Amino acid sequence: MPGAASSPSVGAESNPFLQMQARFAKAADLLGLDQGFQRILARPAHELTVAIPVQMDDGSLRVFTGYRVQHSIARGPAKGGIRFAPDVHLDEVRALAAWMTWKCAVVNVPFGGGKGGVICDPRRLSQGELERLTRRYAANLLEIIGPERDVPAPDMNTNEQVMAWFMDTYSMHRRMTQTAIVTGKPIGLGGSQGRRIATGLGVALATREALTYVGHQGPARIVVQGSGNVGGLGALLLHDRFGHKVVAISDIYGGIHNEKGLDMPQVLDWLAEKRSLEGFPDADRVSNEELLELPCDVLVPAATENQITSQNAARIQARVIVEGANGPTSAEADRILEEKGVFVVPDILANAGGVTVSYFEWVQDRMGYFWEEEDVCERLERIMVKAFRDVVEAAERYATSPRIGAYCVAVDRVAYCLRLRGIYA
Ligand code: GLU
């Protein structure tokens, strides 16, 4: 397939877009997908780069770079988060946009895939600077976003407040309140019950399904990399609602480990107060690299891309990996883990709880009628369980890994829509 990296070299291993393409190419070949469709889906449909001028608090003017990539709208409006990070780059946003296409298709919600990124360090911005940056970025995207076109959401370093500013900016330009323009908004401003915990709950449900699938009985020892919206809340739910033992967890500075299990509510309270896990009592300090290699039943990488690579995959001791983050494992590492018999619940399934409840939020906004948390969680559970089954069935049918099984499910569903719609040439 042109432009695809079927066997990534060392440089390619750290490029998320090439990593995405390698998996896509594998699934497309297994499906026998037409070469023309492969060429269409291997690259994003639409990319926009914008300059974002911001007046800083000290009076100076800075210009930030922002992106919005729409990978596919074959199944519906583009959908996907916005990340604010100092090192975010276009190939990363392209990969993340494509992963959204596949993720929405795996859980069968009627969206395509998109992603946004702004190169900035939000920890170094004041609240006012962050607001001005968000609003100007939103204004710069006006032509390509909309409830029926492209619906952003939170991602790394963006939150409900950022979504509220984004929604307000769009609404002010359109001279009406348009809540369905973004998801992940605060409750009371068009947000959905259950959205905050949705990704973590999806990860916990995927873990439950995976443990049953591999025949694990009783409480599991779980290691979680990351303690934000996905890792932190996922670990809390795995501990509180699902009765597992979280033996290690980390933040960007490093991790804490206790073989007897961590008291997750206490860990999250500590983190909320001190903004770091450092100094947490009754636990050993481990680095983020060491954490991944700890003995455990389930490893949940829920931080960022490229954590499990050809460099460390052989040393992973977990029996099951549940990918809370997008793209935490490289295609080279996939092969090593497969040989070791590790069961990997791939990102496009494991972390799809967030976008599933985003879909519920969008539906509720458009209806103007809001559901109770119980309804949201029940519907999410049904969708996650069905998606898990679809993925393992595809993996069995094509005699491949759950990751490529998930891509097969997704690519087949997207190609179906593409085929029916045609290319309008
Ligand atoms: N940023 C989340 C993800 O990567 C959520 C996207 C959304 O809800 O649109 O899945």
Image (cartoon, rainbow, N blue to C red):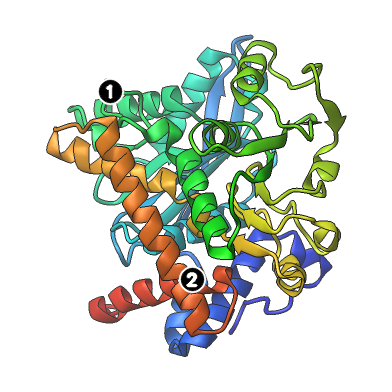
User: Under 8 Å from ligand 1: the CB of mark 1?
Assistant: no
Q: Which residue is mark 2?
A: 392
Q: Position of residue 251 (x, y in %)?
A: 71, 31
Q: Position of residue 3 (x, y in %)?
A: 62, 77
Quadrant for the N terminus, please: bottom right
From the viewer's perspective, is residue 250 above or below residue 336? above
Q: Nearer the viewer, residue 34 or 218?
A: 218
Q: Amino acid at mark 1?
A: Leu
Could you tell me which residue is drawn at 61 percent across and 21 percent down? Answer: 268
Kindly indicate the quadrant of the structure image that contains residue 267: top right
| Element under disc 1 | loop
| Front label number (1 vs 2) | 2
Could you tell me which residue is drawn at 73 percent across and 36 percent down? Answer: 247
From the viewer's perspective, is residue 252 above or below residue 425? above
Q: Quadrant of ligand 1?
A: top left
Q: Is residue 361 visible?
A: no
Could you tell me which residue is drawn at 14 percent across and 33 percent down? Answer: 368
- Mark number displayed over residue 148: none
User: Under 8 Å from ligand 1: the CB of mark 2?
Assistant: no
Q: Residues within 10 Å of mark 1 (few under 14, many from 20)?
A: few
- Mark number displayed over residue 189: 1
